[in-house]
Image: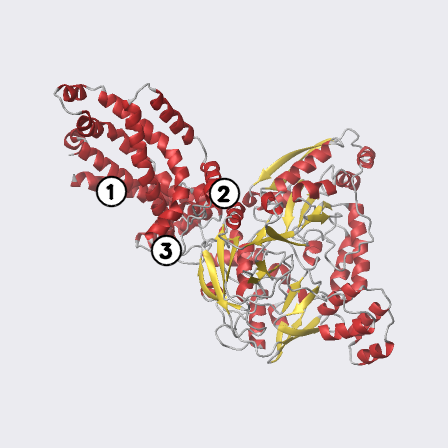
Amino acid sequence: MATDHRRLDSIRDGSSELENHYIDELVAGRVSRRDFMRKGAVIGMSSTLMGAVLAACGGANSVSSSSSKSSGAAPAATKGGTLKLATQAPSAAVNPLTVSDAGGLCMLAQTGEFLAFDDNQALQLKPMLATAWKPTKNGTVWTFSLRQGVKFHDGSPLTADDVVYTMQQLADPKNASNALSTFTSVLKPDGVQKVDASTVAFHLEAANGNFPYLVSSDNYNAIIVPKGTDFGKWQSTFIGTGPFKLKSYTQNVGANFVANPSYWGGAPHLDSTAFTFYSSQQPQILALQGGTVDVIVQFVVQGAQSLINSSQYNIISLKSANHRELSMRNDMAPFTDPRVRQAIALSLDRPGMVQALLAGKGVLGNDSPFSPKFPSTNTTVPQRAQDLAKAKQLLSAAGHANGFSTTLTTEEYEEIPALAQVIAEAASKIGVKIKLKVENQTSYYGKSTYGNSDWLDAIMSLVDYGDRGVPNVFLEAPLTSNGPWNAARFKNKTYDGLVKQYVAAVDLQTQKTLAGKIENLLLQETPIVIPYFIDGLTATTSKVHGVNPTSIAAIYLKDAYKSA
Amino acid sequence: MTTFILKRIGLGLITLWILSLIVFFAAQILPGDPARAILGPLAAPSAVKSLSHQLGTDKPVIEQYWTWITHFVTGDPGMSYQYQAPIGPLLTRALGNSLKLAAVAFILVVPLGILGGVIAALNVGKPLDRVLSVVGLSAVVIPELVSGIVLILIFGIWLNVLPISAAAPPGASIGTQVYHLILPAIPLVLILFGYIQQMARAGTVEALASDYARTATLKGLPRGVMIRRHVLRNSLLPTITVIATQTGYLIGGLVLVETLFHYNGIGSLIYNAATNKDFPMLEAGVLTIGVVYMVATLIADTLYSLLNPRIRYRGLE
């Protein structure tokens, strides 16, 4: 397909330096069309502009996103009705500052909206309450233009003051804000500044090429609320800007929402939605089978085989960065020797694990947090596979020809105890005897600080990490020398330097190159083992269409409807 | 009688106070802290510290207990740490739900159990007696989780005749509410039937063999009248005690049934509160169960004395 250089040149004239860099990368074939769309969205290129560029480069736009993910041919949208959903009960107050659990963040996303929306299946960051965003050349200041004409559910208009208030509260170390784990050493409250009534600038503490993700739906605490909102009382009103408004919320029981006719994006198809809260998965499955609910917002494979194997239900399966991390204390014998850590990693039959533990709903991990879903992941790095002979050889070279005994500490959560069992069996094949210690989550995490947590202190520890839109948190907290969750006590100056560069990099090609170096370094050192990444699963009856779940257990229902 | 009841209430209050102490200090031994439970394991330490301060859980343990109990005795159970909402409405709703479920289970199991016991006693040693005993005792050992799932699969999904959620839609009539509670009540009936049936059987067998029963038969009373008037009245005394001791279980110990049938009872409320170290909620829940338990025992003792004049006259006054 021919490239229309004249059209491209005219586009280039009106574009910024960074945008032109990407256009060059695309024309040169160094960036795929898919990556161009995704990365372009991060640096704030409009979809019209990206569409024009792609058209000029030949061929139709092949990266159109599909709004409906329900499988099967969807009939025309039916208006009205109530969609009934089963979800995990919020484990605490629905307070945008403090929410940390799947049930709570699912509630936030019903009425609240973010500056940007990470539709990670469409592979791009989409505008939500912000229509456009631009970084300065070095990525330390990001400016967001707000959507005009957006109204909160109480009728007040959305302005820069509301955004500044929300973000300052989230980034304030004096508040009990869960967004602090994202904003610490990235954004301070006084870094959020109003430029004019519809423009907000974020002055960062250090360059960050992926900053828009940190104020997107990816950072689920970051819904925009009106200026002056008392976060502790938010659960009595749920005031946001979204397509549904709160009708009623009852702790431990459920929540009802009604359509917001004056939603900026047009009224939703449904009249209302009704969420029922459950404390465990099995009753949710029974409720779907018995017709009490139409949708299970999120479920795991364990105990749900009947749903997965049935043709009666649509299973929406989303690629995610949700994973399990096996850490080995780099400062404790025998794991001080990288050959021992590599041997453990080489003993695992990863494809077998994905089949047996996840019913195939997952992808192989390569002992680094770079999930295949991230555009920056360098897929040229070879996948680690089971190699028992090499593993034994490495153990032997490290002076453990007859193996050794150790303990693996882990938590009672989803398939993790079974995974620990599989790891112990695999290790026994190379002569390593692993004793399992499975604890409840409270005992396992303890105070989540060094010296007060089995998670962080055990010689071998197996933990869960939820999905994120960018790998930054996974790369920093558990692996950098000063990271707060470094259960492996991995301390490597080269690694720290590479991660710093990666986080600051604004363009995708640089990110990819650095990702490749990080992936190779982690394979070489193997401080941690990541056997697989787990798909996010949502189940609906065959009559439900247009639901848009995310892999962090939120679900967006603006385009949802039920057919007769 | 009044002195008896007043004495019992006085003793009950002391028991409740000791219970509140035990719950509070036992909860301190459990791992974890409330702020960490709310914010999740990955929250920043500064956020946890700030929330602990807001909740007051960073204060000395004795001070926390004092603040709580001084409010509690004035009728203010306080705010739930976990839900950031007043405890009163949360607890009332859960207790109401638990009482409804317990009532349905009671109404089903008490007559069935007594009837089963009397029929077995009247047929001592015959096949009917053995069948009733074996069935009753086997049912006692089936965990609620197992019987519950089987029942849901059969009646809720396969036959689709009974709702699988114990919670009726909001504003439903009493009839609909009971309809929703039938399926969840059956596992409880299965567990309790064996106890009550065996107690009723033993009591009836003993009473039937007594002198007064023989006298009644010999003086020519019809068998039905003899059983009703002389045998049942005596044989049911131990049964009433058994029923009363099961009240605590029926109101507060149904975490599994409540979870399976998706019902917001006080059992799961207490369980959640304990897991999340939501101390004010835990105290309020446990003390409520304590009160229910005491009231049930008091009613049982009163009934016992009304049915058995010996106790009323000699033991109590």
Q: Secondary structure at mark 2?
A: helix
Choose mark 1 or mark 2, whichever is in front: 2
For badge 3, the amino acid type reads Ala
Chain designation of label 3: B
For disc 2, the marked residue is B158
Query: Can the viewer see residue A1?
Result: yes
- Percent position (x, y) of residue A113? 58, 68
Query: Can the viewer see residue A414?
Result: no
Choose mark 2 or mark 3, whichever is in front: 2
**Viewer-closest of A520 and A332:** A520
The span from disc 1 to disc 2 (Cα, nearest Å) is: 52 Å
- Percent position (x, y) of residue A362? 69, 48
Residue contact at pointers 2 and 3, CB within 8 angstroms: no
For disc 3, the marked residue is B172
Choose mark 3 or mark 1, whichever is in front: 3
For disc 1, the marked residue is B10
Badge 3: residue crowd in 10 Å (few <14, some 14–19, many ≥20): few
For badge 2, the amino acid type reads Trp
For badge 1, the amino acid type reads Gly
Q: Against A187, is B69 above or below?
A: above
Q: Against A484, is B225 above or below?
A: above
Q: Quick one: label 3 or label 1, which is nearer the N terminus?
A: 1
Q: Are marks 2 and 3 on the same chain?
A: yes
Chain designation of label 2: B
* Quarter of the image that includes the N terminus of chain B: top left
The span from disc 3 to disc 1 (Cα, nearest Å) is: 40 Å
